């Protein structure tokens, strides 16, 4: 579903309904499979709480991810 959220109004409405339902149950919403900026923007617009996928952070070797996470947790910019 995330693949078409920025291109298909029906998909966007369904996703928005899911986000609204989750929020009404005091749940946070995490979208998986976010690969493009346009998807990120669409999910932000409908109130999605968190994103996961290549757009956010591509797969990495464990050591590289650990360094990234340590920097993130310490408030240092990545890289």
Image (tube, helix red, strand yellow):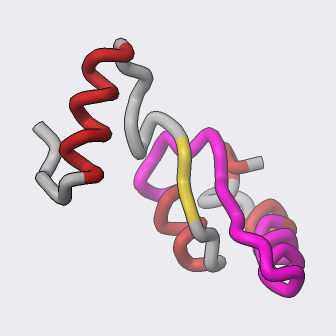
Q: Nearer the viewer, residue 15 or 59?
A: 59
Percent position (x, y) of residue 39? 54, 56
Q: How many marks?
A: 0
Residue visible at 65% across and 53% down in the picture: 31
**Image quarter in which the C terminus is found:** top left
Read off the magenta span. 15-39
Residue visible at 41% across and 45% down in the picture: 56
Dividing the picture into quadrants, the one containing residue 52 is top right
- Looking at the image, residue 78 sits to the left or right of residue 34; the answer is left
Q: Nearer the viewer, residue 73 or 78?
A: 73
Residue visible at 79% across and 66% down in the picture: 15
- Looking at the image, residue 22 sits to the left or right of residue 4; the answer is right
Q: Is residue 27 magenta?
A: yes
- Examine the rendered structure and indicate whether residue 45 appears above or below residue 64: below
Q: Is residue 20 magenta?
A: yes
Q: Residue furthest bottom?
A: 24
Percent position (x, y) of residue 30? 66, 57
- Looking at the image, residue 10 sits to the left or right of residue 78; the answer is right
Dividing the picture into quadrants, the one containing residue 49 is bottom right
- Examine the rendered structure and indicate whether residue 60 appears above or below residue 23: above
- Looking at the image, residue 22 sits to the left or right of residue 44; the answer is right
- Examine the rendered structure and indicate whether residue 26 appears above or below residue 64: below
Percent position (x, y) of residue 28? 70, 69
Q: Nearer the viewer, residue 79 or 63?
A: 63
Residue visible at 40% across and 29% down in the picture: 58
Percent position (x, y) of residue 24? 85, 86
């Amino acid at each position: 579903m995330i693949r078409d959220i920025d291109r298909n109004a029906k998909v966007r409405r369904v996703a928005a309904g899911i986000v609204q339902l989750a929020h009404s149950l005091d749940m946070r919403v995490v979208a998986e499979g976010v690969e493009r900026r346009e998807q990120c923007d669409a999910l932000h617009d409908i109130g999605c709480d968190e994103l996961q996928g290549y757009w956010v952070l591509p797969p990495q070797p464990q050591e590289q991810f650990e360094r990234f996470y340590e920097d993130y947790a310490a408030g240092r910019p990545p890289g």
